[in-house]
Image (cartoon, rainbow, N blue to C red):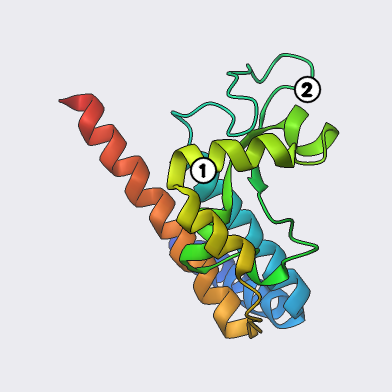
Amino acid sequence: MDFTFSEKGKQVIQKTKKADTRERKKKLLTRSDYLKLAQAAFNAYIRHRDDKNACISCDNWILADQPGGGWDAGHYRSTGSAQHLRVGGLRAALNCHKQCVKCNRFLSGNVAEYRKGLIRKIGLDLVEKIEADQETRNYSVEDLQRITQIYRKRKRIHEKIRQKLQAM
């Protein structure tokens, strides 16, 4: 007996296989993988949030096609020294702003100028709170998945609002 599937049947089988593969890949992810996904979503949100601003450190507008061009989501307190301010929460969002690649990567964050720009942007009181924050936060896999969802959704909301404002 020879079976032939209709196009609809083939699509259902492909969809089922993709869903099964997605689930198996998801089971293989470690906490570190989820942290990377959360970091990527957080950084994309920060770059989008600040895309109308200049670099927080050098206050320059750099085109992406220039040498050293492009933008990063630069952390005032680095992710190595303040792991708890890496992703998630209000303090993490205040600790991270759009920064040119030159300042972030080649000038090691350009911290002195970053602090000046941060004081201009959010005020000395909040900068001192960020500097004094030593509260540890241990994110579970579920927390990291939620953080990823939140920042992806925030970015989409910002994009929709911006599109509506441009349409007016």
In the picture of the structure, the residue carrying the numbered disc 1 is: 119
**Amino acid marked by disc 2:** Gly
Where residue 94 sits in the image (x, y, percent)?
51, 55
Residue 157 in view in this figure: yes
Q: Would you place residue 95 above or below residue 99 in this image?
A: below
84 with respect to 97 (left or right): right
Q: Would you place residue 23 above or below residue 83 in this image?
A: below
In the picture of the structure, the residue carrying the numbered disc 2 is: 68
The residue at 65%/60% (across/down) is 39
Query: In this view, which residue lies farthest toward the left?
Result: 168
Looking at the image, tell me whether mark 2 or mark 1 is earlier in sequence order.
2
Where residue 72 sits in the image (x, y, percent)?
66, 39
The residue at 64%/72% (across/down) is 22
Residue 2 in view in this figure: no
Badge 1 element: helix
The residue at 74%/70% (across/down) is 33
- Which image quadrant: the N terminus? bottom right
Residue placed most toward the observer, 165 or 28: 165
Mark 1, other Cα within 10 Å: few <14 / some 14–19 / many ≥20: some
78 with respect to 7 (left or right): right
The residue at 63%/16% (across/down) is 63
Q: Would you place residue 166 above or below residue 115 in this image?
A: above
Residue 46 numbered tag:
none
Where residue 84 sits in the image (x, y, percent)?
66, 72
**Amino acid marked by disc 1:** Ile
44 with respect to 7 (left or right): right
Residue placed most toward the observer, 117 or 6: 117
